[in-house]
Each structure stands twice: as structure tokens, then as C-alpha cells.
Image (spheres, rainbow, N blue to C red):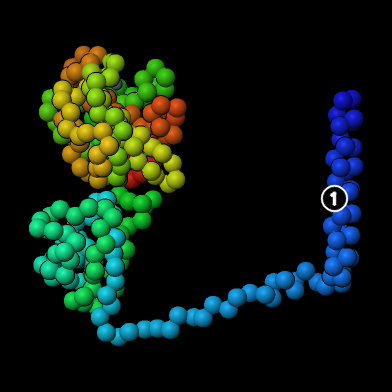
Amino acid sequence: MAGRHRAPKEPIRLAPAVAVVALSAAAAGTVSTPPAAADSIVPVVPEETSSPATPVIQHYTVVPGDCLSEIAQRSGETTDQLYAENRDVVGVDPNLIFPGQVLAVGVSSSVPVVPSTPAHAAPFQAPLDAMTVTQAFKGAAHQGIDLHAEIGTPGYAVADGTVLFSRPASGFGLWTVIRSQIDGQTVDFVYGHMDHLLVSEGEHVAVGEHVIDTGTNGVVTGPHLHFEVWIGGRLGGSPVDPAAWLRAHGVNV
Ligand SMILES: [Zn+2]
């Protein structure tokens, strides 16, 4: 019967608030004014007048995974043209561009630049070229999958991300953890048992980037890659079946 005592409290507490609203409305003399009146006070935003028929110079901000030739292709320019126009920004090496750099594009072309694929629709990459699962995901009992790999097999970043850990770790021997933001979620990709480390903590990596070479370090019975996917982060998040996650993101496993 405790609930019966509690239930009436809410209406009683609400009543004074309603009265105050009515009172203040009356005091302001706006009782008869339909609420819709407020909606009529809408700033008029002038429509953008279009549109130049001459070359459209746009500014494009480099995102992870971009390369100059690809941006040039999207903007209908040659790589040489794009580089020439942006030499000040890019510097001496056209093969080295960095996320955040702002390039002038379309100087040599009137083709509008198609923006890079949005992050949530970015293509993802399998961690290994050959995905042979030798040990399945078993939740707490095995928080990832084991993938057959001879020593020294290159492994890749599944998505754009930042290296969270790349150091010795208990059981893993060495581990590399890459943190990505995917569909508004923090997703950590964990690689274990490498014999040496290829990337440094804090380093940015692009999808498909060669980030590990497989090995036999740590608790293993033979060379393989132990690979985990954690939603919400490796520390504090939840492991999911990497094979299922990859399939759900268009990667064949
Ligand atoms: Zn394993």
C-alpha cells in the first residue's frame, strides 16, 4: 500500500506550478494570445544566391586516409595541379599530407569536390588478408578470435583510429590497441602476440594501414593473431565477437 501513499503526491506538487504559469500569463495580458504567435517571430534567412559558372574554388580539409591523388581525382584535377596549388600547405613531399590540412581544390576545374566518405560509412578493413579463424569468440572465456597467421604476417588497421596501447601486456606478450570512433561509439581493436611493435602510442593510423606483424609472443601454442573488438573501450567496455562485428561492417570473414 506504500504506492498508494506516494502516488497522490505528484499532482499535489504540480498544482502550484500550473497556477503560477496561469497567473503570470494573465499578468502579462497574454492569456488570449495564441501560442502560435511566438512562432511568427522567425528570422528571415536570405536564400543563398547561386551560382558561379566559373571555376569553384573550395577548401577541403584533409581527413585520415586521404591522399593527394585521390583528392585530385575527386576534384577533377591532376595530382600535379593540386599539389602545385597547395605546395605551401603540403610542403616538399606530395605523398605526405596530414588530417586537418586545408587544401584549395578546384582551382583548375569547375567540378565540385565530392566530400570524402563520411566516417560512419567508411570502408573497413579485415585485420589480416587471410581470415582463418582457429579459435572462436567465447565471451569472457575468450574475448576475441584467433586467426591463423605465420610469423611476420602483416596486419592492418580495421578503421581510422589512434594507437591507444602498443606495449607489453600480460598474456598477449605484446599488444596493440587501436581506438576508433564508429557510429558514435568508441571501438577498440586489439591485436595480440606480436613479436615486435610497429606503431607507437598516440600515433594516428588510417584504415588499411599496416600496423602489426603477427608473432608468437605471450601465451600461445603457435603463431597466430589474437584479435578483439571492444565497444566502449578495452578497459571498461564490452567485447563483441570480432567476426560478427566485421561481417556487420561489410568485411568478409
Ligand atoms: Zn586468442
Q: Residue 30, position in %: x, y?
A: 84, 70
Q: Residue 199, position in %: x, y?
A: 20, 34
Amino acid bearing label 1 = Ala
Give the quadrant of ligand 1.
top left
Q: How many badges with numbers are in the image? A: 1
Choose top left, top right, bottom left or bottom right for residue 24: bottom right
> Which of 231/87 is in front?
87
Q: Is residue 27 above or below residue 98?
A: below
| Residue furthest out toward the front | 27
- Which residue is disc 1 drawn over? 17
Residue at x 15%, y 22% (from the top left corner): 195
> Which of 177/225 is in front?
177
Residue at x 85%, y 64% (from the top left corner): 25
The quadrant of the rendering that contains the N terminus is top right
Q: Residue 246, position in %: x, y?
A: 34, 39
The quadrant of the rendering that contains the C terminus is top left
| Residue furthest out toward the bottom | 53
Residue at x 19%, y 18% (from the top left corner): 217
Residue 209 placement, left or right of 42: left
> Which of 189/125 is in front?
189
> Which of 20/118 is in front?
20
Residue at x 36%, y 52% (from the top left corner): 119
Residue 209 placement, left or right of 233: left
Could you tell me if residue 78 is visible in this image? no
Q: Secondary structure at mark 1?
A: helix
Residue 76 placement, left or right of 190: left
